[in-house]
Amino acid sequence: MLALLSPAKTLDLESALPTRKHTEPRMLDESRRLIDVMVTRTPEEIAALMGISDELADLNARRYRDFELPFTTRNARPAVLTFAGDVYQGMAVRERFTERDFTEASKTLRILSGLYGLLRPLDLIQPYRLEMGVRLRTERGRNLYEWWGERITDLVRADLAASPGANVLVNLASQEYSAAVDADALDSRVVSPRFEDEDPQGRYRVVGFSAKRARGEMAAWLVLNRVRSARALTEFDAAGYRYAAEESTPDVPVFRRPRRRD
């Protein structure tokens, strides 16, 4: 059983690390080639490509130039402890994970990345911004989906085969990132949980930041409880969410959180 996550734009480059464990990204040769493309782009071109401010474009142009191999603990940090957006706030691995939990996460969690392809939680990364949906023209095509081709799917398939438990992929990634994986080519079941919150009118809907945190909560829950089957997903009850059987299908389990009524 394997769970997929999206990366985050917000990065933590300062906090003390709760573990010394780390691994090396397995697609660094591809990352290096992408960096070679990005260092040819001016900050103005980067700003236009990504729709970001001049300040952020300058920062990331410097990061591309500063990209350095080999990765060590002096110039890089574990991915799950570097990404700091809503998903990773929901995971709260610093407060929750023991050394054994980090080991479990390395077997059962994967993070999709525009620059690194597919990351294990403890894979070292250097700071970057390169979203999967960016229309970056390269020798392989018009965008990063064409750059990565079947490479990410092939690695996900191999990791699924080596993961503990059932042959199930739990898709906790956004559409932008999960589109980099050809689900039909995996020869496994794909389950995509949906998280809904009640609005003031009593209707349930997906709320962006809440759903992101809920994905992180579920990712941590999968690790901490050593979940090995899709059936066990219905037991998820973190952050106030509960399984909504009548709204669910086998491959899209729905979890709902009632509005607080103080």
Image (cartoon, rainbow, N blue to C red):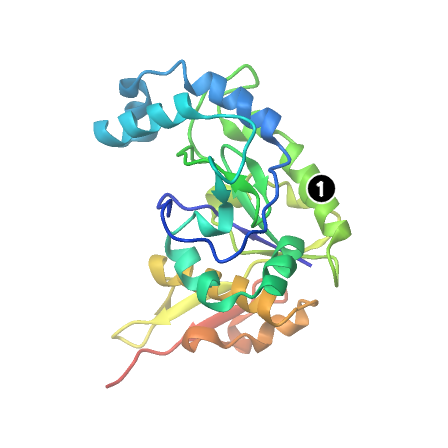
Q: Quadrant of the C terminus?
A: bottom left
Name the side, left or right, on which 233 lies relative to 11: right
Answer whether residue 73 is visible to the viewer in this image: yes
Residue at 48 percent across and 71 percent down: it is 255
Residue at 60 percent across and 71 percent down: it is 233
25 vs 135: above or below: below
Name the side, left or right, on which 143 lies relative to 9: right
Q: Nearer the viewer, residue 94 or 116?
A: 94
Q: Position of residue 249 (x, y in %)?
A: 59, 67
Q: Residue flagged by tag 1: what amino acid is it?
A: Ala
Residue position marked by numbered label 1 in the rendering: 185
- Could you say whether the residue bearing mark 1 is in a helix, strand or loop? helix
Answer whether residue 190 is visible to the viewer in this image: no
Residue 59 position by quadrant? top left
235 vs 182: above or below: below
180 vs 96: above or below: above
Q: Nearer the viewer, residue 39 or 212?
A: 39
Residue 219 position by quadrant? bottom right
Residue 41 position by quadrant? top left
Residue at 60 percent across and 47 percent down: it is 120
Q: Nearer the viewer, residue 206 or 18?
A: 18
Q: Position of residue 72 (x, y in %)?
A: 54, 36
Q: Position of residue 203 (x, y in %)?
A: 33, 73
Q: Quadrant of the N terminus?
A: bottom right
